[in-house]
Amino acid sequence: MGIISEIAGIEEKCFWDAWSEKSLEETFKHDYNHVIAVFEDGTTLDDFVFLGNEKLAGYLIYSEVAGEAELLRIAVDEEMRRKGFGGKLMERFISELEFMNAEKVTLEVRNSNSAAIGLYTVYGFDQIAVRKDYYINPDEDAVIMQRPIAKNDDEIGRFSE
């Protein structure tokens, strides 16, 4: 089973509006979309640099264009939850954005998803808006959260000289 199939399998378990394998393949045809995967042994890899033998624990999908990023999807397999994999994904994600010199990252989350909101808050996201009745099945508001991205040391040094 390929990594796209594994991601699609976790999608099916975690989301009522799961992205299909075909939809995922289309997503990754664009060079502004990226994936970070975390495996059962805790390693994280990005953009399909996978060895093929690992057991996928979770993934994070994001886009980055002109210094602005958007977290599109994050999921951890139900059997792997509460083991720190979400945090590993977020740490790698923020690190990647720092490396890309992104300025900020935005996401939206269901108002009732307190676990996700808690995770995002730990990683420096603040609520900036609410989209009323954004989600369906069930109808629910979306909380819009955003986080600035710190410039990496090379960038900071360049401007302080």
Image (cartoon, rainbow, N blue to C red):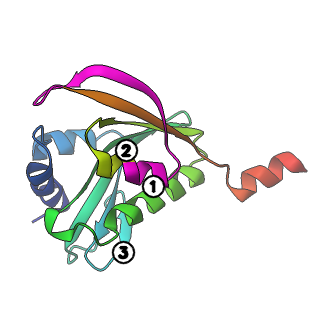
**Quarter of the figure with residue 131:** top left
Tag 2 secondary structure: strand
Q: Is residue 122 magenta?
A: yes
- Tell me: 142 left or right of 124: left
Q: Residues within 10 Å of mark 2 (few under 14, many from 20)?
A: many
The residue lying toward the viewer, choosing from 38 and 138, is 138
Return the mark for residue 93.
Answer: 1
Three-letter residue code for mark 1? Phe
Sequence-earlier tag: 2 or 3: 3
- Tell me: 48 left or right of 125: left
- Tell me: 72 left or right of 159: left
Residue bearing mark 2: 62
Percent position of residue 39, x then y: 28, 72
C-alpha distance separating marks 1 and 2: 9 Å
Q: Is residue 23 above or below residue 74?
A: above
Residue drawn where x is 73% and y is 58% of the image: 153
Residue drawn where x is 10% and y is 43% of the image: 20
Sequence-earlier tag: 3 or 1: 3
C-alpha distance separating marks 3 and 1: 13 Å
Mark 1–mark 2 CB contact (< 8 Å): yes
Q: Is residue 66 above or below residue 43?
A: above
Three-letter residue code for mark 3? Thr
The residue lying toward the viewer, choosing from 55 and 143, is 143
Residue bearing mark 3: 43
